[in-house]
Amino acid sequence: MHSNRYTLIFAMAITIVLAFFLSLADSSLKDKYEKNVEVDIRKNILLSLGFSPTDDLPWTNENVESIFQNSIVEFVVDNSGSIVANKFPQDIDPNVDLNLYPIYKRVSNSITEGYSIPISGKGLWGTMFGYFSIEPDGATAKGITFYQHIETPGLGGEVDKPWFQNNFVGKRFVDENGTLIGIQTVKGQVDETSKEAYHLVDGISGATMTSKGLNQYLLKDLKLYDPYFSKIRTKRNG
């Protein structure tokens, strides 16, 4: 019969060996998880800018990386709307670079086809994260996507459904004087004959708090980028 000392040593040895393999697995899975998160974010940037997977080109990690590298130009602007030289989104330290903002520009044959910016803010249950894309005119929505939220499925969770996101396409977030006003989701359906329809989208039934949160933080984030996009609007309008 084994002594208590033998049993204790055996148990400790097993624990150490298992801890080693668990640590090794955790490290390996962590790298894979972080890579998948990065790819998912890039998918959302591409989706907001009008890209979509096809039968001929499914969105594998490799294909997403290739499309992103060939079609997206990444840069950073400051709170005056000026591009920061030699600075890229991945270089931004959120704890230090409080006045620097990433932008992802879709380019084809040296022609700008849109811009995408990150958006985030409180919904009903927690923080929502997504991307809002802007047409080359610096005033019109090109698309919107969400890659993380904890809103109620069937209610606020509808923010990640195409029917809701498609409502934003073509809506303007500045008024006729060029003043930033954002895009507002409304209760029910938008009266497309009204003079305000150009910046209103259909709301989600039963998701008032989610809609209000989106209205607020979308405008908040657009204000951060307005110094840059107002320059684009000024330049285009002569």
Image (cartoon, grey):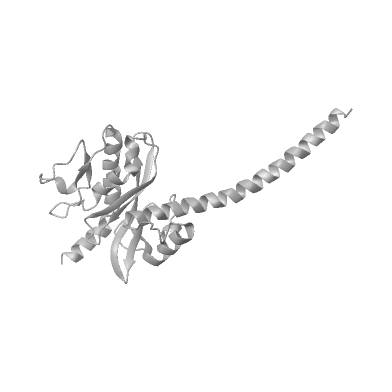
Residue 158 at what x, y percent from top left? 32, 39
Q: Which part of the image, by quadrant, shows the C terminus?
A: bottom left
Where is residue 43, by image quadrant? Answer: bottom left
Residue at x-position 53% and y-position 49%? 33
Residue 189 at what x, y percent from top left? 18, 39
Which residue is outermost to the right? 1
In the displayed structure image, the side of residue 29 where residue 66 appears, left or right = left
Residue 126 at what x, y percent from top left? 39, 36
Marks counted in the figure total 0
| Of the pair 31 and 63, the residue shown nearer to us | 63
| Of the pair 80 and 226, the residue shown nearer to us | 226
In the displayed structure image, the side of residue 206 where residue 150 appears, left or right = right
Residue 49 at what x, y percent from top left? 32, 57
Where is residue 128, by image quadrant? Answer: top left
In the displayed structure image, the side of residue 172 where residue 60 appears, left or right = right
Residue at x-position 56% and y-position 49%? 30
Residue at x-position 18% and y-position 47%? 199
Residue 135 visible within the image: yes
Residue at x-position 77% and y-position 34%? 11
Residue 85 visible within the image: no
